[in-house]
Image (tube, coloured by chain):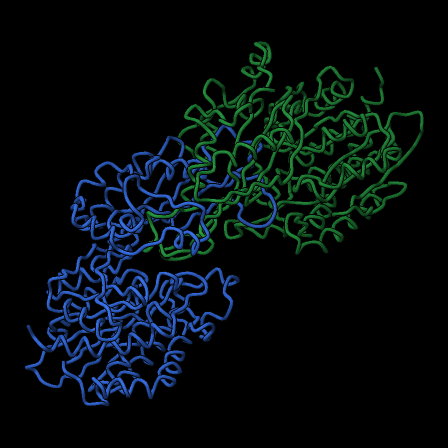
Chain colours: A blue, B green
Amino acid sequence: MKKSQAYIAENKERFLKELFEIIAVPSISALSEHKPDMITCATKIAEQLISSGADKAEVMPTDGNPVVYGEKIIDPELPTVLVYAHYDVMPVEPLELWKSDPFKAEVRDGKIWARGADDDKGQGFMHIKAFEAMVKSDELTCNVKFMIEGEEEIGSPNLGKWCEENKEMLKSDIILISDTSMISLETPSITTGLRGLSYMEVTVTGPSHDLHSGLFGGAVANPINVLSKMIASLTDDNGKITIPGFYSDVVDLTPIERRSIAETPFSEKEYKKSLDIVDIVGEEGYSTLERTGTRPALDVNGIWGGHTGEGSKTVIASTAHAKISMRLVPNQDNKVIGEMFKKHFLNIAPKGVKVNVEYHHGGLPYVSPTAMHAYKAAEKAIKATFGKTPLPFYSGGSIPIVSTFETILGVKSILLGFGLGSDAIHSPNENFPLANFYKGIETIPYFYKYFAQKG
Amino acid sequence: MKKSQAYIAENKERFLKELFEIIAVPSISALSEHKPDMITCATKIAEQLISSGADKAEVMPTDGNPVVYGEKIIDPELPTVLVYAHYDVMPVEPLELWKSDPFKAEVRDGKIWARGADDDKGQGFMHIKAFEAMVKSDELTCNVKFMIEGEEEIGSPNLGKWCEENKEMLKSDIILISDTSMISLETPSITTGLRGLSYMEVTVTGPSHDLHSGLFGGAVANPINVLSKMIASLTDDNGKITIPGFYSDVVDLTPIERRSIAETPFSEKEYKKSLDIVDIVGEEGYSTLERTGTRPALDVNGIWGGHTGEGSKTVIASTAHAKISMRLVPNQDNKVIGEMFKKHFLNIAPKGVKVNVEYHHGGLPYVSPTAMHAYKAAEKAIKATFGKTPLPFYSGGSIPIVSTFETILGVKSILLGFGLGSDAIHSPNENFPLANFYKGIETIPYFYKYFAQKG
């Protein structure tokens, strides 16, 4: 891979410039006003695939945002790597907290600052540039297919169907994904577990119209007070989720697994400092890495109702709303949990209010076995560029589509992520260190090399 | 008062047209962008006072919005009535729920529909037009002073100081206010009790920036979950407020008071129907009229945090906010309660979050004794136009300034309100029946007549 590495070193500046052009398109999948930007972004990615050496690249329609598909088949006898990434990004509000324009990427303090700098434009683009380096250096050892979607941040509602319809085209030996983090550049890691997700939206309705809180306060159920009580009751004082049956399918960690997690470098002091929190809080009896990587969680992602503007308004709101999501661990089923939540939430509704519960989206948890040939190839690739064998790591995040790939395409995924916990993905001031961006591009060709050396 | 009544009958249409012009000014005191509208509205009211017969009328500055002062002194020997009203109105959001423009008043189904139609432009304007009728008919029996302020809906922060500075000018025998409701046109009533108010704003801060709920969920305190738990704990399952000492100063109702309230006509069925609620909910052991009129209450008036827009965002918000107000009953002190709330709320904050509590504004409860000469005059005035003796009524609303008037000016107030519970004040589609508007104008001159007949 010497020629590829030299090529990467020579073209670093251009790679960055090209990434900034992709970042400049505000492809926010959650907001319908950005529909045209999704097409623009997909088209730019397809052009990139072609200019980087793909035989063909196509913007393929779905019922939602299009999927970009590209491929280079060098020899049907060789193994095929299917790269998955997403070109859509999260909303950027609250905008006032950003130190620079989220869609005008800039480099400060050795980092790229922009929405999508890491998740997943930065990490996705590493694969296109690593591919270019291998093609232009004549060092490509596998066939390559790309599927880059535009709806990951809203739960990939159309990708399953698209995979189903394009099964033959997507035939491959491994799916390679960079949409996760590693512990640090000093302690590289490969994500071996992802949590599942059930994302719900609830509405509590009291009186049919807003009321004067003086004239009616104390005599009618206030939807915000009621919603607060309902949310409060979903977790107990030990940080356990109280929905009946919620933990039934959760498999306890083995002592070996717990020991392995306990050995993962983790500084509680650094963790608290980076978040500016006085104390960590979570499920009784588990460490922070266990809580985020191996235990389910319930978080309110948004809440609103009544007067939220300036000043005071003495009102009892007619409705109160919340977005509530649950992270799930292996063996839990997002649809079963969604139904369980709905039944329970309707069940605990007090008299005097009406409650509506909607299932937004979700996905199954995923485990990537460390015994796989592809895992070993990833391990060796990281060893080659980082000089250290990476640790297996349970991430708390979810990429719901990963388990769907396994179900529909029958192919396992390798989560070769180069992000850091401090990248502030989904938040204001998302960033991606330049070192990680280039290290990713350098590491990926080694994965192809070792993966082609079939055990 | 025959000539006055005839004058009112002849000028009905014009009175309504003039009211609509006052309503057209969006004088929302809670929103600073409406500052210029406050001046415009105050000026229009001063012009109205002059054209209606006042000797003088002035727009007097304060540190906030101006107070309109006007007077007509016919004989220093006669009793003086000080009319209080307010020209500011509540915000209008959510705008999409209004069936017509809140600032373009229109008459439909026998009602005036607009922000301020009742509270308090409609009710305040009745006094100016009743005054005009008495002046033009030469039937004015008292000296009259008007103080019409522009900050009632934000807690009258500057009126106390203004009263203090203008004590001499405001000398009077009674303060007359129409800013409350009666039970119905068939069952007229006079408000004899008002609840006090302590309005708070709280902020819960967790991590210093928004976090990805997958990567961090389960390991850090989520400010929205925490705020929900804190709010939930403020009231118990019996509808009692749990803040230590909260009820210490509350005086229990006497059996006679309870009997009098129990005799007030009230249909639970109609009440539930008008609010479209399945059940009434409140403090155990009290009736609906007792709950709203004589017992304290705690309501969340607004809550917000995290992703409140379209779609889903898997975020743990850095902060969560709520506006929480408490209605107070005689003997409770709004400042003491505000301090009590703050201490308690900080006290129940769990580890892992920072909590901030601010006191927005408030006021003391008020009782208007039914034995007063002025109360008897109001009773007779209503008897004259409604044909029925009004019932005394405990309202749940607050006009914090009323107790301030008593403290600073040493003058009691009569709450001669002509609104209805169905007027949707503070809500979309605020309205005021034409019948009530005209009945109010007709009744007020009789109050002056009977009040002048000093016992």
Location of residue A39 (image quadrant): bottom left
**In the image, is B68 to the left or to the right of A324?**
right
Q: Which is more toward the observer, B437 or B295?
A: B295
Pick the quarter of the image with the N terminus of chain B: top right
- Mark yes or no: residue B136 visible: no
Name the residue: 53% across, 29% down: B297
Q: Nearer the viewer, residue B369 or A174?
A: A174
In this view, the residue farthest toward the top is B255
- Which residue is rendered at x = 76% and y = 27% of the image? B406
Taking depth in this image into account, of B125 and A292 the one nearest to the observer is: A292
Residue A183 point in image, percent of width and height: 30, 61
Q: Is residue A42 above or below residue A418?
A: below
Q: Nearer the viewer, residue A415 or B442?
A: A415
Q: Position of residue A38 (x, y in %)?
A: 35, 73
Residue B355 drawn at (x, y percent): 51, 42
Residue B430 visible within the image: yes
Residue that lies at the very extreme toward the right in this rendered image:
B76
Q: Give the quarter of the image for residue A166.
A: bottom left
The quarter of the rendered structure image containing the C terminus of chain B is: top right
